[in-house]
Image (cartoon, rainbow, N blue to C red):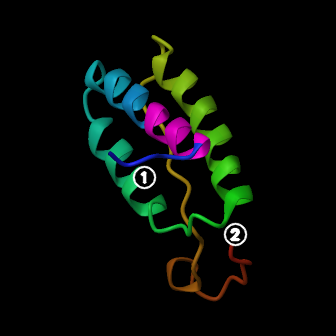
């Protein structure tokens, strides 16, 4: 049996909660899965970044559970290709 760290257990718990909440709202399940899949590439040693994403995920989960929520925005990096000659600094 695989032993998970406390942080890994928190992330898995958050993922399960998101899946349950997303089932009740159409169109949210693919967004939830893609966000978690994208962030699964973060090294396990980058604890500060994982904790930040965990806190942000908990806030987004509260928004998703809100009965008035119709859509959630996903954060993505800005690129110069999307915005032409505008000089935008990449987000961390």
Q: Nearer the viewer, residue 63 or 53?
A: 53
Query: Which quadrant of the structure image shows residue 50?
Result: bottom right
Left or right placement of residue 3 versus residue 51 in this view: left
Q: Which sits in the foreground, 45 or 50?
A: 45
The structure residue drawn at horizontal position 70% and vertical position 69%, both measured from the top left corner, is 92
> Who's the residue at 69% across and 69% down the image?
91
- 30 up-or-down from 65: above or below: below
20 part of magenta stretch: no
Please provide the residue range marked out in magenta: 6-14
Q: Residue at x 67, y 65 (%)?
A: 46
Residue at numbered disc 2: 91
Q: Secondary structure at mark 2?
A: loop
Name the residue at the front extreme.
1
Q: Please indicate whether residue 28 sits to the left or right of residue 70 in the image.
A: left
- Please state if 66 lies on the left or on the right of 21 as rendered: right
Expressed as whole percent of the image width and height from the top left, the position of residue 65 reads 47, 17
Magenta stretch contains residue 11: yes
What's the mark number on residue 60?
A: none
| Label 2 environment density (alpha carbons within 10 Å; few <14, some 14–19, many ≥20) | few
Q: Is residue 81 above or below residue 53?
A: below
Direction bottom: furthest residue: 85
Count neighbours of disc 1 (C-alpha within 10 A) and say few if under 14, some if 14 to 19, many if 20 or more.
few
The picture places residue 54, in percent across and down from the top left corner, at 61, 42
Mark 2 and mark 1 lie on one chain; the one further toward the N terminus is: 1
Element on which disc 1 rests: helix
Residue 64, x across and y down, in percent: 47, 24
Quadrant into which the N terminus falls: top left
Q: Looking at the rendered structure, which numbered label has been put on residue 35?
A: 1
User: Magenta region, mostly helix, strand or loop?
Assistant: helix
């Amino acid at each position: 049996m695989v032993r998970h760290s406390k942080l890994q257990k928190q992330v898995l718990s958050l993922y399960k909660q998101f899946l349950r909440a997303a089932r009740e709202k159409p169109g949210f399940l693919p967004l939830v899965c893609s966000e978690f899949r994208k962030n699964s590439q973060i090294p396990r040693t980058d604890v500060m970044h994982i904790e930040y994403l965990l806190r942000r995920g908990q806030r987004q989960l509260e928004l998703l559970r809100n009965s008035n929520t119709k859509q959630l925005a996903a954060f993505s990096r800005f690129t110069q290709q999307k915005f032409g000659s505008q000089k935008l600094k990449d987000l961390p």
